[in-house]
Image (spheres, helix red, strand yellow):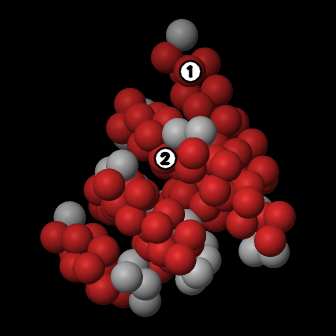
Amino acid sequence: HAEACEVLQANGCVALANICIGKDAAGMQRHQAAVEAGAFQVVVAAMRQHAEACEVQANGCLVLGNICCGMDAAGMQRKQTAADAGVLEVVVAAMKLHTESGLVHSYGHEALSNICLDPVLKQAALGFGALRLWLA
């Protein structure tokens, strides 16, 4: 049962990541709709519940990185909303736990880089134990 749940969570993250691809106006609307529907809370919960599941962690980081792109006012608000939902904490935890996973580190780096364009959020990530090179 637990293994099936992990697969479901990992696949759900990939599906949401695919929906939230794109940096054009339509893509940004999808990012915003995902946030308004509670995507951050759902992905954070999945990553916390399945911390040992590398695929859940990688796919969670992927979708979080996709949703958190954008430098306009809405994009900056998404970054703050992500941080408020616990995204920085779970991404840093995933990268610290899954040191051998290239996917967790690649997608985690993208997520942290997108979110930590805000200097306050960068400091928060460092407070959770992020390495500076993960934020560049």
Residue 127 is labelled as none
Residue 128 place in picture, x, y as percent = 20, 64
User: Mark 2 packing: few (<14 Cα in 10 Å), some, or many (20+)?
Assistant: many
Give 83 or 64, whichever is nearer the viewer: 83
Q: Quadrant of residue 3?
A: top right
Residue 49 place in picture, x, y as percent = 38, 30
Q: Which residue occupies 69% across, 36% down?
A: 11
Residue closest to the far top = 1
Query: Which residue bears the numbered disc 1?
Result: 5
Q: Quadrant of residue 9?
A: top right
Q: Quadrant of the C terminus?
A: bottom left
For the residue marked with disc 1, what is the amino acid?
Cys
Q: Quadrant of residue 66?
A: bottom right
Q: Which residue occupies 16% across, 70% down?
A: 127
Q: Is residue 32 left or right of residue 30?
A: left
Query: Which residue bears the numbered disc 2?
Result: 40
Q: Quadrant of the N terminus?
A: top right
Up/down of 115 relative to 133, above or below: above
Label 1, secondary structure: give it: helix
For the residue marked with disc 2, what is the amino acid?
Phe
